[in-house]
Image (tube, coloured by chain):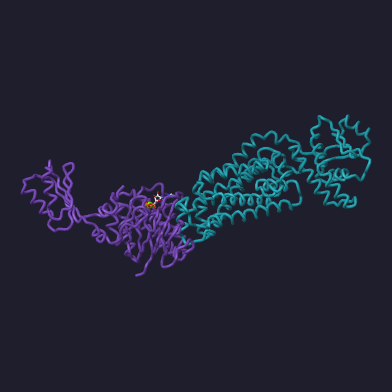
Amino acid sequence: MSTVIEVNNLVKRYKDLVALDHFSLKIEEGEIFGLLGPNGSGKTTTINCILSLLSYNKGEIKVFGKEMKPTSYDAKKDIGVVMQNVAVFDELTVYENIDYFCGLYIKDKETRKKYVEEAIEFVDLSDHRKFLPKKLSGGLLRRLNIACGIAHKPKLIFFDEPTVAVDPQSRNKILEGIKTLNENGATIVYTSHYMEEVELLCSRILIMDKGKKIALGTKDELKRMIKNTETIKVEVLGLETDYLEKLKKLPHVYDAVYEEDLLQLYFSGGKHNLIRVMEFFKENDISFGRVTTELPTLNDVFLEITGKELRD
Amino acid sequence: MFWHNFKNCTAVILKGKTTIFWTLIFPIALATFMYMAFGNLMEKEEMFHDINVAVVSSDEESQLMYVIDSLSEGDDSLLNAEKMTEEEAKKALSDETVEGIIFADEVRLTVNENSADASILEGILSSYKQNEYAIKNIIEEMDGMPDEAFIRTLTDDIMADVSYYTEQSVSKGNQSLYTNYFYAIFAMSCLFAAYSSITVTGNLQANESGRGMRKCISPNSKLVFILSEFFSLLVIHSVVEIIAFLYMKKVLGIDFGDKNPEILLTLFAGCMIGLAIGFIIGAVSNIGMEGKIGIVTAVGLGLSGMADLFVNGVKHAIEQHVPIINKINPAALITDCFYSLNVYDDNSVFFQNIVIMAVESVVLLLIAFMMVRRNKYASI
Ligand SMILES: Nc1ncnc2c1ncn2[C@@H]1O[C@H](COP(=O)(O)OP(=O)(O)O)[C@@H](O)[C@H]1O
Ligand SMILES: [Mg+2]
């Protein structure tokens, strides 16, 4: 396996704002690499720098092992980008749009025709090939945007928040599609501020904030980085402070909060935490409502490292 | 790639409809309004005729006599000059058989104040006076026998001058003075082809549109994009101008003379320079589409204004003080092409103007390419 993208100490400033602060990453062939971070953390800026669209103040960028420049046509041939904002010609139909952008890469007419058909099939727009973009719903428009980015069968594909403002049905299609592309051999760079998607899709995840790398690893590795292993929530009316103090002393509990009739117990390690909590309630004859137990999410990882929620 | 992009650009402009609608409607609507406004005048206007003038001179060989003789010769003569004694001349003037008396020795003019042609005679004299020193030098150098070509250019200059002074066409062609206003429409609509250029360059710049981003990340040189899109627009706008031309000629029945190929070449060169100007403006980043539309409008109107398209006299003033501007101002070049086709039999001035426009277009396009070639942007 070879390294597809290598970014070293990238610094990008927009006037006074430091959008990327000595940012580095390395992406291997065949990965679905997730860039997870809140809005404004620098995901799009990173992609645009890698693509040589943006100038940057410092750092090195290599794609397919070679320094990336605006004239690196050999590398560009094998790259596909699905931009954050839909980028198509309003004057052209679905088919014409895909055909035009595919034609920027594929000279041969027959091959191009085949590729365009495959792309239309892939994003399931067969019934809409003669539609103008303005006649497409948000989800379908996003799918057209994807088709325009991938029709030329690139080896490296960037997806910049492809599911923003997309209905759940289209969203699932998109995620499935990305998996398929990866199975067919493409390396994927996927950015999102939705941790669920990234968790579901990505083989490795880089969490970033304010232009800096915060953590990097598989989702399990990331979760192991933090203290929390389980959170148990119990709906209970009028819990006395006495009991709360006692609950905090249960094994493996490192914190407990009681607010608005909801008890939250945070555990670090331990195998039978739920049973112990239930026993405590039974012994003290406290009645309770719904009980849930949650494993840590990437949000918890983000929360613990940065002290703030990932979601905006 | 060239054709692929050429076709795309053509399709986008044609299917976009608004651009093509306005570029086509502009010359046609304007021509129709002018036609309705001038309709009657155009028919009533008399063709230019020779002006009867008496010449009082003691010296057959004076410089002014050369000029007067030359203005009285040929198909496109301006004057019908007759030598008289002072008494005869005064009598002729009071009988109104002549419009004025030129006293060649003193370079002085007496005119019948009521005469419509008085201003033309005054124009000739004042133009002559302005050039007197130069003429004198040259004639002396030539040992009193100036050659044909020299006198020819001199009289052409004077004719051109006179038409400025008098705001009248002194052309002997079949065309009326109002035809000039229709030439002006062509000049403006060629310059306003620049609106299409900025639409197209907006689709080429990563910091202006997602479409531009897609083009920038594709493995293609910007030069190919620029050239293919330029030629696409050139074809579209040439066709637009031809349609407008045919409309004015066939539907409105305006007489543009019989030099059709030359007129088409002028329109083609006009579109070329108009589009190239648009590419330069479009290549400037960070001023936004509104800013660019504003600049195109200002440049188009400014250049047209300098070429007398709104008020007469500006071009002449420029000719006197900074003549180089008239040699490079595309609006002046376009109208001058039409004018020279109309006035001169010989096409050398015409071709010179066409070549200047072509060279300017190439230079502007190259600069535009240099500007967008650096396809890393500081901000997107
Ligand atoms: N063109 C720009 N000019 C100035 N600041 C910008 C520009 N583009 C992005 N930024 C700023 O840079 C930071 C990173 O933006 P971006 O890369 O778009 O983040 P993300 O894609 O993660 O939401 C943000 O603070 C954003 O406001
Ligand atoms: Mg973004």
Q: Which chain is purple?
A: A
A305 left or right of B230 in image: left
Query: In the rendered picture, chain B carries what hue?
Result: cyan
Vertically, is B260 above or below B218? above
Q: Is residue A180 above or below residue B300?
A: below
Q: Judge from the rendering whether residue B212 lies leftward or rightward of residue A292; answer left or right.
A: right
Provide residue B351's location: percent of width, then percent of height.
71, 53
Q: Observer-nearest residue: B379 or B361? A: B379
In front of the other: A183 or B243: A183
Closest to the observer: B231 or A239?
A239
| Residue found 6% across the figure and 49% down from its top | A282
Q: Residue pushed farthest bottom?
A: A1
Q: Please give left or right for residue A26 compared with residue B342 in the image.
A: left
Q: Is residue A144 left or right of residue B126?
A: left
Q: Which quarter of the figure has residue B305?
A: top right
Find residue B56 and report its image quarter.
top right
Percent position of residue A209, x then y:
34, 53
Residue A85 percent across, percent down from the top left: 40, 51
